[in-house]
Amino acid sequence: MSDVNKAWPTEIRLAKDRRTLTVAFDSGETFDLPAERLRVLSPSAEVQGHSPEQRQTVPGKRNVEVLQVEPVGNYAVRLTFDDMHNTGIFSWDYLLKLGREGDSLFAEYESELEAKGLSRDPVT
């Protein structure tokens, strides 16, 4: 029996509007991951820091788009966003986690925004 926490992507597709990345796994699960969620929960050091205390809450990314999806070896993809953020390496395990736990992780992000007086909307 395979480990349910390990899954291999069978398809990665960027929507035409560049706002959703669909990832299908060999576990039978398919997730539509919004670009905003991918951007604000990026695994990059710029967002996550090098410790939990350094993690950044990134505001104003409601309308962000993914410009490019590039393979990194056989274990991940690098996403380039229209704000030119491209330092996050999204491993298959992390994409699976964002699919399975994304709603609760995004709810935590929204709570952090509110606590810091920040908004999902870009500053105009």
Image (tube, helix red, strand yellow):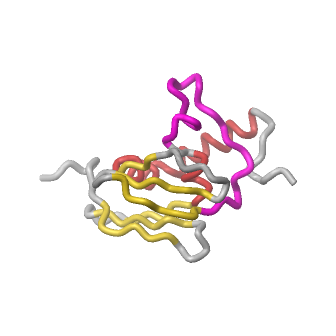
Quarter holding residue 36:
bottom right
- From the viewer's perspective, tell me whether residue 43 is left or right of residue 115: left
Instruction: Determine the residue positioned at 25% across, 51% down.
Output: 4
User: Picture coordinates of residue 57 (x, y %)?
Assistant: 66, 37
Does the magenta portion include 45? yes
User: Picture coordinates of residue 23 (x, y %)?
Assistant: 40, 64
Instruction: Determine the residue positioned at 27% across, 58% down.
Output: 8
Classify 40 as above or below 10. Answer: above
Does the magenta portion include 26? no
- From the viewer's perspective, tell me whether residue 85 is left or right of residue 100: right
Q: Nearer the viewer, residue 41 or 72?
A: 72
Q: Nearer the viewer, residue 1 or 25?
A: 25
Instruction: Determine the residue positioned at 50% across, 26% down.
Output: 50
User: Picture coordinates of residue 63 (x, y %)?
Assistant: 70, 61
- From the viewer's perspective, tell me whether residue 20 is left or right of residue 61: left
Count the numbered circles shown. 0
Classify 58 as above or below 80. Answer: above
Q: Nearer the viewer, residue 113 or 36?
A: 36
User: Picture coordinates of residue 107 (x, y %)?
Assistant: 61, 45
Quarter holding residue 34:
bottom right
Instruction: Determine the residue positioned at 44% across, 55% down.
Output: 99
Question: Range of the magenta residues?
Answer: 43-65
